[in-house]
Image (spheres, rainbow, N blue to C red):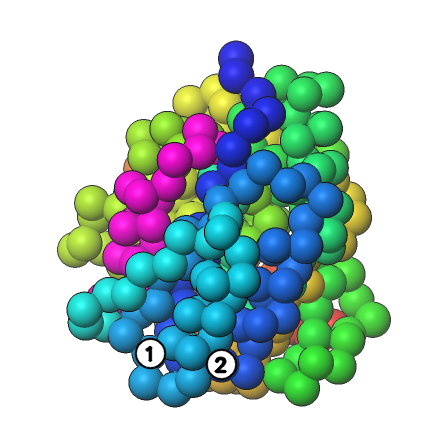
């Protein structure tokens, strides 16, 4: 099996994120693991995002900057970036999340030590104003398919995986059935025998927006059910694991109110 030594492609869609994008970019280009490229795609932003992208692309030659001619959304933008990526391994980061400077270096080290296929980390959280929550979402050293069904502990902005695995297992062609595409990808990988290993350190900081807590619970629940349906769970399995999802979601919400 190949290891991620060499070029890692960092996938970064950007849309109207002028308030947070600089922090995100600084955390990526400041990585101690230096052999990376940043596929930065501006999804037709209407605020100051474009100026920030231009400035950082001029500052660091590792940033490959593109602009969508029209707004196509995060998923389509991410897929465009993946197809442009030159690295065998890819990492995702959202435009309001921040990485610890050693994130990629530690993930590469774990992959070499365990020969795993999907590497994830624990997460810390801040609110819209940057105030840090005391709670940390810890992760196990290893997670399998059955365990992941109960709760998606693999944050999208924390992962490192092969580009080929993402293209093989991600349901990006399924347009008729909205779901948590990243969750579906991780589940399909693990069900196929791929191995996931975790670093129980908060190597990413995830920004919590009020809307994501207060108004998206019903939609998130629907997307989760669609994810279970997509991977082939029967009616009773879907509702059992949805109950597990709901209980874990309530526990998380209690810490992030």
Q: Residue at x 37, y 28 (%)?
A: 164
Q: Distance between the residues labelled 1 and 2?
A: 9 Å
Q: Residue at x 63, y 63 (%)?
A: 26
What is the magenta range?
72-89
- In this view, the residue farthest toward the right is 134
Magenta residues, dominant SS class:
helix
Q: Name the residue under label 2.
A: 18
The percent coordinates of residue 15 (x first, y second) are: 38, 74
Secondary structure, mark 2, is loop
Asked if the residue under mark 2 is in contact with the one under mark 1, i.e. CB atoms within 8 Å, the reply is yes
Q: Mark 1 points at which residue?
A: 45
Instruction: Examine the rendered structure and indicate whether residue 198 appears above or below residue 127.
Output: above
Front-lying residue, 180 or 129: 129
Tell me, yes or no, whether the highlighted magenta stretch contains residue 63: no
The percent coordinates of residue 6 (x first, y second) are: 56, 28
Which quadrant would the C terminus be assigned to in this image?
bottom right
Q: Residue at x 73, y 55 (%)?
A: 100
């Amino acid at each position: 099996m190949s290891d991620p030594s060499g070029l890692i492609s960092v996938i970064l869609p950007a849309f109207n994120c002028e308030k947070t994008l600089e922090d995100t970019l600084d955390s990526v280009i400041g990585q101690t693991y230096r052999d990376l490229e940043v596929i930065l795609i501006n999804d037709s932003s209407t605020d100051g995002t474009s100026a920030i992208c231009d400035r950082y692309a001029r500052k660091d030659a590792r940033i490959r900057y593109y602009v969508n001619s029209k707004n196509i959304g995060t998923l389509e933008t991410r897929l465009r970036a993946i197809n442009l990526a030159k690295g065998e391994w890819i990492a995702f980061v959202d435009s309001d999340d921040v990485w610890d400077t050693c994130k990629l270096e530690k993930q590469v080290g774990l992959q070499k030590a365990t020969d795993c296929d999907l590497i994830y980390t624990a997460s810390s959280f801040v609110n819209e104003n940057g105030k840090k929550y005391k709670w940390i979402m810890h992760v196990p050293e290893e997670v399998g398919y059955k365990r992941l069904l109960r709760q998606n502990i693999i944050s999208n902005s924390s992962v490192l995986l092969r580009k080929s695995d993402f293209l093989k297992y991600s349901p990006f062609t399924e347009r008729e059935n909205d779901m948590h595409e990243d969750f579906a990808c991780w589940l399909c990988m693990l069900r196929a025998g791929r191995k996931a290993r975790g670093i129980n350190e908060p190597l990413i900081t995830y920004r919590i927006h009020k809307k994501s807590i207060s108004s998206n619970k019903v939609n998130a629940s629907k997307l989760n059910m669609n994810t279970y349906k997509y991977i082939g769970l029967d009616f009773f399995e879907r509702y059992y694991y949805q109950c597990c999802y709901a209980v874990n979601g309530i526990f998380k919400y209690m810490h992030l109110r």
